[in-house]
Amino acid sequence: MRKLLQSVLGLSFLLLCLTACKGSAHDSPPVIDISSPDRTVESLWAFQSWEAVKDAKEYANRQHVDYSAFAPEAQAKFKGQLQRSIERAGYQAKNRIRKVEQETSTRAVVHASETGWNDETEDITYLLTKTDKGWLIRDKTKVCWRCKGAGEVDDLDQKTADIEAGRYSTNPKKKCDICHGKGWISAIFD
Ligand SMILES: [Zn+2]
């Protein structure tokens, strides 16, 4: 009886270990924490990073055809590309929060620096509001790529018209047609 108990216990321990040790930490999604504005944004990044790495690994695992016998150099290059795509996939992990502005008890702005796949960084602003569940992202904005935040751009048509009419022309401007004069665009609503 004791022996049986021992083996059952041993088996349960083995099963427990197998379940716990089956996947690395990367295989289970990160825990979502929306208890503060910065934690919400960091949780979003952790999730994006986790998913991107998972996708890259799954893609690499689907490549079953081995070209070594036909084109060894091509195979080596391909394997290297797959490996690099996995390494680069989790680039959201490099994102950083620059500043958190708590505007009211239920509204906050998180200024962040986000890194793209090409390692270029971009300033991003998140607007969050507090709900009974926690802090939720309401908007994600960035500086308008066309006017670079000015809200207006050179009016080349006007300048050409001025010159053609013989009028003195300095540097006529017009409202930016991408951000409609705001200087920023929303990644969610624009
Ligand atoms: Zn603009």
Image: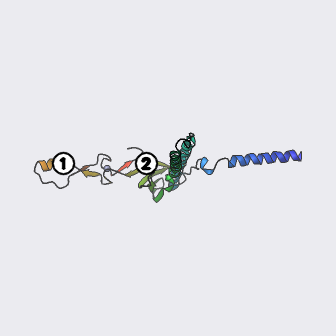
- Disc 1 on helix, strand or loop? helix
Quarter containing the C terminus? top left
Q: Tell me where residue 23 appears, x and y as whole percent.
A: 64, 47
Residue at numbered disc 2: 139
Name the amino acid type tagged 2. Answer: Asp
| Mark 2 / mark 1, whichever is N-terminal | 2
Name the residue rendered at 20%, 54% in the picture: 171
> Is label 2 within 8 A of ligand 1 (CB to nearest ligand atom)?
no
Question: Is residue 110 visible to us here?
Answer: no
Give left or right: position of 156 versus 98: left
Number of labelled discs? 2
- Where is residue 127 drawn, in percent x and y? 44, 51
Local SS, label 2: strand
| Residue 2 seen from this side | yes
- Looking at the image, is 89 positioned above or below residue 62? below
Q: Outermost residue toward the front?
A: 70
Q: Residue furthest left?
A: 166
Q: Which residue is mark 1?
A: 158
Ligand 1 within 8 Å of disc 1? The answer is no
Viewer-side residue, 117 vs 167: 117
Could you say which disc has been placed on residue 66 in the image?
none
Callout 1 amino acid = Gln
Q: Nearer the viewer, mark 2 or mark 1?
A: 1
Q: Position of residue 101 (x, y in %)?
A: 45, 58
What crowding class fits label 1: few (fewer than 14 Cα within 10 Å), some (14-19), or many (20 or more)? some
